[in-house]
Amino acid sequence: MLTERISLTQLFALILAFNLGSSLVFGIGLEAREDSWLVILLSTFIGVIVAFFYFKIIYMLPDKNLYQILEYCFSRPVAIIISFIYAVYFFYIAARIVRDFSELTSAAILPVTPIEFISLTLTVLLGYILYLGIEVLGRTTEVLTPYSIFFLLLLIIFLYGSRSMSLENIQPVMGRGVGIFIKSMFPYEVARPYGEMVVFMCILPLVRNFKDSRLTYLVSVVSSGLFLTLTSLLITTSLGSNIALRANFPLLSATRLVSIGEFIERIDVISVFMIMLGVLVKSSVFIYGGLKGLEYIFKLPYRYFVMPMIFIISVFSIFISRYFADHVYEGLRVIHYFLSMPLQFMLPILLYLIVLVKTSVKGSSVSK
């Protein structure tokens, strides 16, 4: 099997785009209304701890990915079962992300185009990138991420120039009490996107100079949290909390408020580019994580499974829910308790404890 490597800069770009990801499609923390930006900011601090926890597990066993660590902690038969569960989970989340973008494109950009065609086109593109390898995904993200950041700053300037932003829309601060913070943060805003970074346990061992990647890793997580906070401020100050909560695609709705001198208008392409890059990277990372699980189970290079899984994900993204409302409800209310909590938090904590004990015992025996 070929050994693939990504640089620290590519790791930074991948994490930044991943964490923005589908969060830009529907927005996050909007249940807190005026305090949505503050919920995201506080969630970032907890998210840094969660993300560093995943990094710490890999740091103790730098030559092993998630599935190899499972075998290290348990026997191979048990590791195969858990690896299959993780692979299916990663493919499932990827299908949901594909559906997110397909809904956005079908409803707001290409209303006449069948959603099945949009989903198939996106997944074929993902399959092509992944077949070329994680290095290609890293280089692509590295090139396009600066444009996404520039477009976000440009959007802020345009909204401010068109006088569509008002600080009154985020007042009063904490006017709804502390309870709304806890309800919004746990488990939704911590699990998405920071808990989802468990999939990076499949990518971190591929980083060049992994021993020196801690700072890059943490800075990328903090930066993504700050950009999410900035995006939430942008949405809330321009649309208002009530409209933002009711809007299906709040960032796109905010972008459509731009109107400067009846000349700079309808700049939807800016927000669509940011959303598409995040969706492309996030879904690709999840699919790659699932493919590495199949590689571990069947002991075959993951490229053998790329195209079959791509078409399965494309079909499953359509049948995953009948209606848009069902899709959103399932993503926000169901999977966090039945899938995300066990696979993002409970099992990694168990892995950490087992690895910690085994490495400590091995270190003490070597010293003797």
Image: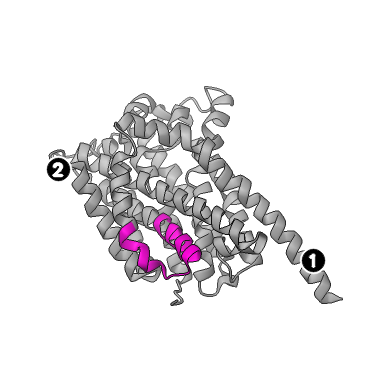
Mark 2 to mark 1 CA distance (whole Å): 60 Å
Residue 194 in sight from this viewpoint: no
Rendered-image quadrant of the C terminus? bottom right
Specify whether residue 346 is painted magenta: no
Disc 2 designates what residue?
113
- Indicate left or right for 98 with 261 as reference: right
Most extreme residue toward the top is 176
Q: Amino acid at mark 1?
A: Val
Specify whether residue 294 is painted magenta: yes
- Indicate left or right for 161 with 194 as reference: left
Most extreme residue toward the front is 77
The dot on residue 180 is none
Disc 1 designates what residue?
361
Residue 341 spot, x, y in % from top left: 56, 41
Q: Amino acid at mark 2?
A: Thr
Residue 184 spot, x, y in % from top left: 51, 32
Q: Nearer the viewer, mark 2 or mark 1?
A: 1
- For the stretch drawn in magenta, what is the main secondary structure? helix
Residue 87 in sight from this viewpoint: yes
> Which of the pair 28/203 is nearer the observer?
203
Residue 122 spot, x, y in % from top left: 26, 53
Q: Residues within 10 Å of mark 2 (few under 14, many from 20)?
A: few
> Which of the pair 149/69 is nearer the observer?
69
Magenta residues (range): 286-308
Color theme of the render: one colour
- Indicate left or right for 266 with 340 as reference: left
